[in-house]
Amino acid sequence: MCGIIGYTGFREASAVVMECLQRLEYRGYDSAGLAVVGGQLHLFKKVGTIGDLAADVPDMQGGTAIGHTRWATHGEVTLANAHPHTDCRREIAVAHNGIIENFQKLRQELQRAGHTFASETDTEVVAHLIEDAYEGSLPQAVAAALKKIEGSYALVAVAREEPGLMVAARRESPLVVGMGDREQFVASDVPAFLPFTKRVIYVEDGDLVVVRPDSVQILDPAGRQADREECLITWDVEDAQKAGYEHFMLKEIHEQPTSIAHTLRGRLSEIEPQVLLEEADLGETDSLAIVACGTSYYAGMVGAYIMEQLASIPVATALSSEYRYFGQKRGTVIGVTQSGETADTLGALRAAQRHGCRTMAITNVAGSTATRIADATILTRCGPEIGVAATKTFTSQVAVLVLLALKMGLSSGALQTDAVRGYVSALRHLPSAVTRVLDREEHLRQVAQTLASSRHLFFIGRGIHHPLALEGALKMKEISYLHAEGFAAGELKHGPFALLTPETPVIALVDDDPVRDKMLTNIGEIKARKSPVIAVAPDHDAEIEAFVDGVIRVPSLPPPLSCFPTVVALQLLAYHVARERGCSIDKPRNLAKSVTVE
């Protein structure tokens, strides 16, 4: 969840690392720091923002440096707990993401051996372990330290006595090498160094990486030279910048006509009603489960509904953090993860494989851990997403799940060619439908103004709109800090009715589907409790105004594809409520973009 950057090369390392740290801000953090190797080991840390760090950073000259943005796991948010961490003599520095599970035991052993600790963190143990094993070779010392560590890590270490050298390693936490000309990078994510190079190597679990300005050597867990494939990043640094928008989140909401088109491109036959998704061959399966976390989980719930409707196949959905320990491991398991590095989802996929399940990953990042461990992968291809609150990745994940459902339905005979032809035609119109929602942003901003002073907010829906209600509530919570809850509309009377008051607005998701009349009944029950109701309804619904206090109109699409314009409207609504409330939209408090710890 934190951000790592390491640099060694011909440039002034501190300036490079500071620039790269700014590109890692989106991952979420509470403190930051850097260590520079020149004639000595320079260290500077700060609680607060990268801007705070940059304002006070002293002149620290050297060609090798590591930097870190910390999201607290062990120890409070203090200067002492900020990374990088050093050994007793302040000659070795380490930046680390992950969890050292046996750090208390290791800390006690090191303290008995005479080591003095300056922080409460698990990471500092690594610096002292390296110090204990150091005999002039940092790679050997890091390798020795890692043998004693239990848990997950992506880390990079430097030593005063070996300028020009970085040693990195990973286990269950993302790490990528950027390959330059007389300079090399190590980072937790590609955007950190994208202005400098597009050539990358994704580090695999158990790898040890020895990095010098003119070379990168990768050793596998057995210590043998490993040949890892070099990849070329296809998107530009401009894709990871705001391009004139006030926030990354707003930019990414507005990118959805393009990102959905990219997801669909080349996957819909121009000649026959057919889905061209060769990588999605699930084979024969008697059981299908979708596992994910957060927004990806709600995309999975939407996908499960669509698969059951279009392919007539039962689909279980499970939170990855629950499935890996308690879920039934059988059949085919699909892991949905934006980054491909979500720790719980990777754990769920590994658990499924240990039980003999076939696995598939739906992710946005080629070369990520999920793509390497799953038996099959479908890339969403929606480009980088910087804002912590997922927007375009949600719609692209759902688009992939729609394609998968159509392919499965056509293969099994559950869908006839005429039906598939209709869905393919509707899919082609998705980008324009989303564009029409974006054109109505001013109305959504006005609705947001009426909600911004609320303390509580409900979202309700039935069928496919139930997970959309959950996702709408999640977006509202995570960026506006307004307490919001999503419910299946029929469940309000089983408890949540007790919370309804005239000060509790309700967002009702209404569609032209078999449960429309039931939804209107539920709205009536809410109105009887004096709560104001705002409906999100299709353009062709001429009667909805009679039942509610306000309407957010979305373009009419056949169910289940109507979920796309609906969720984009909810994203814009959450964004403008957060903006009215003056919240930190791109970097919500306590949250991080890529959750790489349990």
Image (cartoon, rainbow, N blue to C red):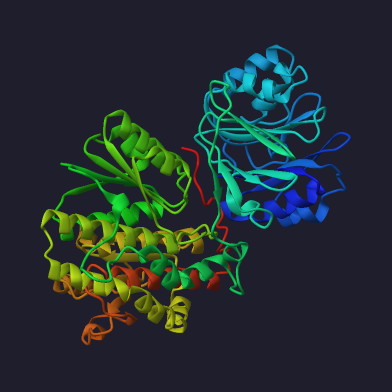
Tell me the residue at 23%/83% (across/down): 541
Residue 131 shown left or right of residue 589 in the figure: right
Tell me the residue at 29%/33% (across/down): 326
Task: Farthest residue to the front: give it.
Answer: 271
Residue 506 vertical position relative to residue 154 in the rendered view, above or below: below
Taking depth in this image into account, of 358 and 108 the one nearest to the observer is: 358
Residue 485 vertical position relative to residue 166 in the rendered view, above or below: below
Residue 247 shown left or right of residue 329 in the figure: right
Rendered location of residue 285, percent (x, y): 18, 42
User: Can the viewer see residue 594 in this picture?
Assistant: yes
Rendered location of residue 435, percent (x, y): 41, 79
Residue 226 lies in what quarter of the image?
Answer: top right
User: Can the viewer see residue 49 in this picture?
Assistant: no
Residue 114 lies in what quarter of the image?
Answer: top right
Rendered location of residue 29, percent (x, y): 61, 49
Residue 584 shown left or right of residue 366 in the figure: right
Taking depth in this image into account, of 542 and 382 the one nearest to the observer is: 382
Residue 156 shown left or right of residue 505 in the figure: right
* The N terminus, quarter of image: top right
Count of marks overlaid on the render: 0
Taking depth in this image into account, of 314 and 115 the one nearest to the observer is: 314
Residue 91 vertical position relative to residue 399 in the rendered view, above or below: above
Rendered location of residue 470, percent (x, y): 33, 59
Residue 9 lies in what quarter of the image?
Answer: top right
Task: Farthest residue to the top: give it.
Answer: 113
